[in-house]
Amino acid sequence: MPLLKVENLKKHYSAGLFSRKVIRAVDGVSFELERGKTLGLVGKSGCGKSTLGRTILRLLEPTAGKVFFEGRDLSELKGRELKKLGRKMQIIFQHPEASLNPKMRIYDCVAEPLRIHSLCKQGAEKTWVYKLIEAVSLNEELLFRYPQELSGGQLQRVMIARILGLRPKFIVADEPTSMLDPLVQAQILSLLKNLQQEYGISFLFISHDPALVEWMSDEVAVMEMGKFVKYL
Ligand SMILES: Nc1ncnc2c1ncn2[C@@H]1O[C@H](COP(=O)(O)OP(=O)(O)OP(=O)(O)O)[C@@H](O)[C@H]1O
Ligand SMILES: [Mg+2]
């Protein structure tokens, strides 16, 4: 059984209150993803890559189609079950600063998801946070700073540590490094690859850069106008 199975997924938008036009952002995408593998996704701006990633994760309600994760139809899950499975499906965005609360110290940014999902026993939080920070090769001194006192690369590592605490099985990486300079980009991508090997995580890796996607992925899909048109 694949980890993730996407069946004829669609996300359509109305073009506006007074328009009958429909924007077919995602228009019938199907694929399967095995454990520990990466599907790369390339395509022109506006072809539907981000919408696909978000619809798979149910951050957007699909217009049609189904998503199965660990064999379960996500549309049939509710409440605690959805929360439990949802924890295993995460997203890394281009702008980590937008997802981190500027008033929270880095320590709390990393600890917050552990608290929300009750993932560590009382008294074990600190050990976990330090482990996570070490896993993403961040200096412990940064734990008591605020997000605005960190560089873009450091912030992206914080985001990865935050997500890693949730023990994800599937991550949508939506242009996670396109705002970073090439050296930092390479470091972050290597980190993701190492974590993938260590924890058997599957990725949907979205990028504008075909060479980069090819390096990161086991298979690369090309998207055009909401559809997969070929595999590279
Ligand atoms: N909330 C929305 N309402 C209406 N149209 C939308 C909405 N969100 C996205 N779209 C449209 O859906 C299409 C796909 O957008 P999407 O952001 O998925 O593209 P993308 O491939 O990720 O582009 P980029 O490479 O620039 O990030 C675009 O035409 C966009 O304008
Ligand atoms: Mg996008």
Image (spheres, helix red, strand yellow):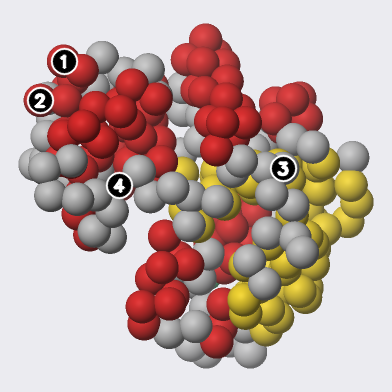
Kind of residue at badge 1:
Glu
The residue lying furthest to the top in this view is: 183
Q: Of marks 4 and 3, which one's residue comes earlier in the chain?
A: 3
Mark 2, residue position: 144
Q: Residue at x 61, y 41 (%)?
A: 200
Q: Nearer the viewer, residue 50 or 77?
A: 77
- Image quadrant holding the C terminus, namely top right
Location of mark 4 (residue): 99
Q: Distance between the residues labelled 4 and 3?
A: 26 Å
- Of badges 4 and 1, the one in the foreground is 1
Q: How crowded is mark 4: few (under 14 residues within 10 Å), some or many (20 or more)?
A: few
Which numbered disc, 4 or 3, marks the residue closer to the eye? 3
Q: Is mark 3 on a helix, strand or loop?
A: loop
Mark 3 — residue?
A: 37
- Residue 20 tag number: none
Q: Distance between the residues labelled 1 and 2?
A: 7 Å
Q: Earlier in the sequence, mark 2 or mark 3?
A: 3
Amino acid on which disc 4 is placed: Ser
First along the sequence among labels 2 and 4? 4
Whether pointer 1 and pointer 2 mark residues with C-beta atoms closer than 8 Å, the reply is yes
Marks 2, 4: nearer the viewer? 2
Which residue appears at 81% of the width and 48% of the height? 221
User: Eyeballing the image, is 183 above or below 88?
Assistant: above
Say which element carries label 1: helix
Q: Which of 91 and 50 is in front in this view?
A: 91
Q: In which quarter of the image is the N terminus?
A: bottom right
For residue 141, the mark is 1
